[in-house]
Image (cartoon, coloured by chain):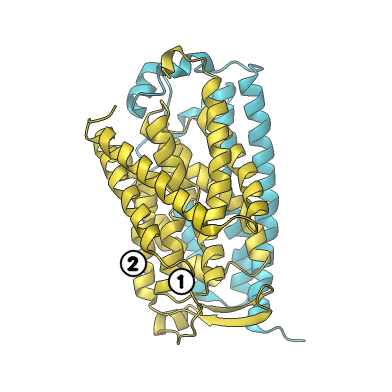
Chain colours: A yellow, B cyan
Amino acid sequence: MEAATTPWWIWPIALFAVSFAIGIVAVLAGVGGGVLFVPIVGSFFPFHLDFVRGAGLLFALAGTLAAGPLLLRGGLASLRLIIPLALAGSITSFAGALVGLSMSAAVIQTSLGVTVIAIALLIWHSKEAYGASIVESDALGAALRMRGRYDDPAEGVRIDWRTHRTIAGFASFGAIGFLGGMFGLGAGFANVPALNLLMAAPLKVAIGSSGMIISVINSSAAWVYIHRGAVLPLLVVPAILGVMLGSRIGAQLLSSTPATTVRRLVIAVLLLAGVRALLRGLGLWN
Amino acid sequence: MELTPEERDLQVEQLYARWLDAATRIAFAISAAAFLAYAAGLLPAHVPPDLLPQVWGLPVDEFLRRTGSPSGWGWLALAGHADYLNLACVALLALVTALCYLRILPALAGRGERLQAAMAALQVLVLLAAASGFFAGGR
């Protein structure tokens, strides 16, 4: 469809529909919506990638802000983890946003394509479920009191948890924040393994805390895009409304949809969007 | 009865959750109302929606130059226009986290959680520095 000849109002409606679908799939697949939003909208919509990344950050921010109260009230997000790790990520995401906006569209498209393909492969090879393990805190983790307790109604158990490898955790969230700011992603795909596999937080605490960490990290990077003029409300608001509604539907479908099917769908979509971004960046498919 | 450390943590998290819930609902409601006014043409826009398709494919610097749009905090002066009123409303979402952190700071400090309080205060400074636009390089 040629953007210049299409009535302007088609695009916000299409954006709403795509964001709605992303909201459903993201919840079912357990990934943040931003990682789908930026490559899909950046590859198949007429907006420049600068505006897509600005919208992507706010898209992920809105979703995590909306989910935050439920996660905290359910004991699934821990401020003991969020406050220190989000501090590292928010500083680097700010730097990432500045770097991303100073790069040419071709370079950022190519880098985005490579990153998204790598994310798809990471999801492909990652474990489908991570078991909770009991570890001893390291010195920094003990000083920061990175531990907690939550009741798991599904399992009917109370879990006392601690984390370790705190310095490696800080380094990971620094790197994740930088990439998230540069590409306008939420980076939940990387937060959860970092919290769960690296630091040994229980899976549910890792997922809940990841969402809250995204809300802090993206609040920092979003300002770079706002001040640079890279936030178009005509993109952002339909996307936010679409993902909020889609996420609710996704949450309702969660118990009845086969996780493997959705996971395969997400990998396929990411590979398609990643290849498209890569070829656009290399000037091979415009 | 003295609270356990986990119960005290939960108190702070509940406080954060209450403020997050209220602030997010307000920001979403304002953003949705402002967007309806924008899309329905109830207020004049700095860049009318029907002209946007000609410029939304441009890099942001070129977009600003072609449309005579500001960057940095310059957009606040245009908040009477529907598109920039919408931007102001969307920007509220980026302030919600700082507000919640500010709210829990006294609670953390009051419990003697010096390290947590210091990191939360530093986080507020990072968010305010980002919001200031000083480091973002906007014109």
State the image coordinates of residue A50 (x, y, percent, origin top left): 37, 34
Which image quarter is the N terminus of chain A in?
top left
Residue wearing tag 1: A196
Q: What type is the residue that disc 1 sits on? A: Asn
Please name the residue shown 41% across and 25% down the image: A46
Please name the residue shown 70% across and 58% down the image: B18
Residue A171 is labelled as: 2
Chain designation of label 2: A
State left or right for residue B16 relative to residue B137: right
State left or right for residue A145 relative to residue B21: left
- Would residue B30 be seen by someone viewing this image from the given angle? yes
**Do dots 2 and 1 share one subunit?**
yes
Chain designation of label 1: A
In this view, which residue lies farthest toward the right?
Answer: B1
State left or right for residue A4 relative to residue B98: left
Please name the residue shown 66% across and 23% down the image: B37
Tell me the mark number nearer the camera, choosing from 2 and 1: 1
Which is more N-terminal, label 1 or label 2?
Answer: 2
Q: Is residue A273 above or below residue A13?
A: below
State the image coordinates of residue A64 (x, y, percent, origin top left): 56, 52
Disc 2 crowd, CA 10 A, few/some/many (<14, 14-19, 20+): some
State the image coordinates of residue A178 (x, y, percent, origin top left): 35, 53
